[in-house]
């Protein structure tokens, strides 16, 4: 049950409502920030960045079933639409699009976007089909909202890379902007899934950002990887709630692992389970010639 939205914020609760409101933005530059709700400070920073690039900011709130695998947290993913509408109203968002699953995926659906090789490594290996689901819903949202620009968080770096690839490969005329990761003072990257963590697990989760800091202090591909893996493996030995999934150093555009002599910007990415919650984090590192 969705209660009344605060103040002047417009809310489209269906595709039909969106299609009534969207023409009122004609001639204005529109930014879209796709989200799955449970909005936090990290999302607020996306909305702020979106407002710097457009006259109107549209936020979608949709927990996309297509990007969750069997046994993942689709059913328990936090759905707190009243809270989300308040965050959007306070952040100067113009329109929130909150479609239902049935509205976005009418029966009979067959066509999917495939993320390809770059969507099958790291997060894609741990979550088969995840990026196909992400790209499919993002393209649908682009087609419905028709934004000039869309903003995505750099915390989901592989998602951002796949979306950048999709707009090139499918000639989608939306400018994609990445927004820096927002962290708590102690280094924990903000995530809607942090809500699942107990106090003790939240403390354990700090190992991810600490491992990235340890890695980023190094200057070569092997030492960066060793320092990051070493930190997380030691942390996991002392802490049974922590289980390392992967550490990887990848090209930010292709998400292919970089060679030992790679020069340029790379993404140092980690994933780990903390209790029953799977968390990801990353740092951008610069590799200079030897
Ligand atoms: O990053 C997210 O919240 C989701 O993957 C997105 C981009 C909204 C697609 O469902």
Image (spheres, helix red, strand yellow):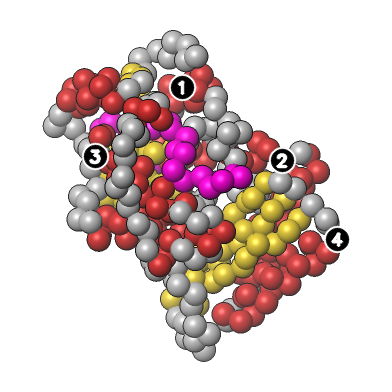
Q: Which residue is mark 3?
A: 143
Marks 3 and 4, how far apart in space?
A: 49 Å
Give the alpha-carbon distance from disc 4 to disc 1, as whole Å: 41 Å
Marks 1 and 3, how far apart at CA: 23 Å
Side (left or right) of 185 relative to 150 = right
The residue that label 1 is drawn on is 85
Q: Pointer 4: what residue?
A: 238
SS for callout 4: helix
Q: Nearer the observer, disc 3 or disc 2?
A: 3
Vertical position of residue 83 compared to residue 194: above or below: above
How many other residues sit within 10 Å of disc 2, few (<14), some (14-19) or many (≥20)?
A: some
The first of marks 3 and 2 along the sequence is 3
Splitting the image into 4 quarters, where does residue 56 fall? top left
Q: As displayed, is residue 248 above or below residue 8? A: below
Q: Quadrant of residue 142?
A: top left
N-terminal of the two: label 1 or label 2? Answer: 1
Instruction: Please state the total of marks drawn on the protein image.
Output: 4
Would you say the residues marked 1 and 2 are in contact, meaning their CB atoms lie under 8 Å apart? no
Q: Is mark 3 within 8 Å of ligand 1?
A: no
Q: Position of residue 103 (x, y in %)?
A: 34, 27
Which span is picked out in magenta?
48-72
Residues under labels 3 and 2: Cα distance?
Answer: 36 Å
For image coordinates 45% across by 81% down, the residue present is 263
Residue 278 at x, y = what percent?
64, 50
Q: Which tag is nearer the camera, tag 1 or tag 2?
A: 2
């Amino acid at each position: 049950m969705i209660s009344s939205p605060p103040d002047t914020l417009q809310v489209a609760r269906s595709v039909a409502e969106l299609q009534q409101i969207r023409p009122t933005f004609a001639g204005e530059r529109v930014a879209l920030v796709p989200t799955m709700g449970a909005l936090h400070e990290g999302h607020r920073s996306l909305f702020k960045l979106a407002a710097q690039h457009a006259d109107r900011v549209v936020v979608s709130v949709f927990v996309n079933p297509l990007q969750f695998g069997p046994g993942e947290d689709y059913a328990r993913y936090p759905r707190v639409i009243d809270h989300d509408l308040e965050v959007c109203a306070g952040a100067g968002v113009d329109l929130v699009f909150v479609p239902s699953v049935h509205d976005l995926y009418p029966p009979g659906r067959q066509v999917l976007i495939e993320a390809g090789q770059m969507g099958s490594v790291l997060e894609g290996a741990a979550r088969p089909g995840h990026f196909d689901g992400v790209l499919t819903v993002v393209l649908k949202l682009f087609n419905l909202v028709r934004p000039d620009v869309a903003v995505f968080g750099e915390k989901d770096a592989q998602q951002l890379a796949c979306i950048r690839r999709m707009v090139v490969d499918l000639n989608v005329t939306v400018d994609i902007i990445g927004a820096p990761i927002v962290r708590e003072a102690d280094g924990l990257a903000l995530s809607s899934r942090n809500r699942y963590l107990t106090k003790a697990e939240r403390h354990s989760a700090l190992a991810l950002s600490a491992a990235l800091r340890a890695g980023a202090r190094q200057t070569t591909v092997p030492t960066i990887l060793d320092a990051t893996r070493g930190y997380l493996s030691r942390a996991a030995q002392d802490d049974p709630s922590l289980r390392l999934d992967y550490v990887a150093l990848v090209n930010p555009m292709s998400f292919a692992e970089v060679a030992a002599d790679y020069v340029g910007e790379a993404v140092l990415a980690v994933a780990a389970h903390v209790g029953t919650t799977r968390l990801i984090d990353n740092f951008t590192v610069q590799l200079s010639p030897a």
